[in-house]
Image (spheres, helix red, strand yellow):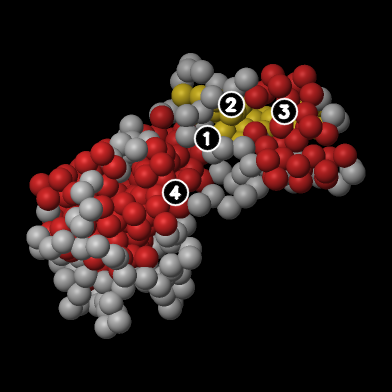
Amino acid sequence: MNIGSILAGGDATTKFSPVYETPVSHTEWVMVDCEKAKEFLTYNTFDNQRKIREQKVDNYAHQKRNGDWKPGADGGIQIARTGTGVWELMNGQHRLHATIKAGVTIPYLVTWYTFASETDKYTFFASVDQGAKRSESDALLALGIQSSLTGVHKVGIRCATAAIKAIELGFKAKGGNKDGTNPNTNTIAGTKRVLDAFSDPILATFNALMGNRVMSVRTFNSACFGIALLSFTYAPEEAQEFWPEIIDPNTLTKGTPQYALHHYLLTHTATEEADSYAFCIANAWNAFAEGRGIDLLKRGSNQTILRVACTPMDGKNVNAGREIIAARLSSHGGK
């Protein structure tokens, strides 16, 4: 994907004339031992850097010990700043940790970049190859400075990304999208635009679901978060009453939809109940929205299309999810 399309706010297929600001750079070969690796890691302060993957470090360390590492073929170490700002490690944290773990000295190609703007620096980080596939949410986090979701916890952005995909695909179990693509969010640019369009409901949903640490873990999955997002988007007052009660057991009364959903989330997982999980969560919300009591959550034998009360996803239109996402994009001006 052309990284310029992200900043332009269009899909990857949109034609435009990108403007590039050439960074000032200096590249040198450096013999990196344990002490030098630790020195470079003092620059590892970039707020959107990914977490260390220990398995990746172990794999790299094994290659270094056995002499299988090919200097220069790995992209080297890349450190960047804006203007005269602080240097930050953009690329190479896993290799540096592996060098320390292996206890060897490795020649690294080290490049120091000075970018003209924060936008250029964050875009560079979003596109750089760090030896492992960067997920869509990783890239969105890297570009977070340009999003209206700046300041939202990383967990919230990742969960919101998955939830939007779930909405678009009608909450089908994994593999339900036969062609493997999402028409509106199949690019980082598209997903970012939808996240921006959903900004306020995402914040409301995230805040509502964060009250209880145990329950927040249960509610941060694509089905539960997606249904909550829909409810906050189309019925915010009712949603604000419903969702916070689920994560606070002191407010629950047996026989209410909140009680039933609280119990269901604690005793079931999305993995175990892949075909019925989203239906059960939606059924709890539907019962609340329609003023009905409920004791046990289960998927009805005739339920084939998920219904979310008070939203356009009324169970009659199989393409409702895709239309909702398209509408949000349209209301956001397609930007």
Most extreme residue toward the right is 66
Residue 89: percent from left, percent from top: 58, 29
Q: Secondary structure at mark 4?
A: helix
* Amino acid beneath label 2: Asn
Is 253 on the left-hand or right-hand side of 77?
A: left
Q: Are marks 1 and 2 in contact (CB under 8 Å)?
A: yes
Please name the residue shown 24% across and 62% down the image: 295
Which numbered dot is residue 44?
A: 2
* First reached walking from the N terminus: tag 1 or tag 2: 2
Quarter where residue 113 is shown:
top right
Q: Which mark is residue 137?
A: 4
Disc 1 is placed on an element classified as: loop
Residue type of the residue flagged with mark 4: Ser
Q: Which residue is labeled 3 in the image? A: 28
Q: Residues within 10 Å of mark 3 (few under 14, many from 20)?
A: few
Residue 162 vertical placement versus 62 (above, below) = below
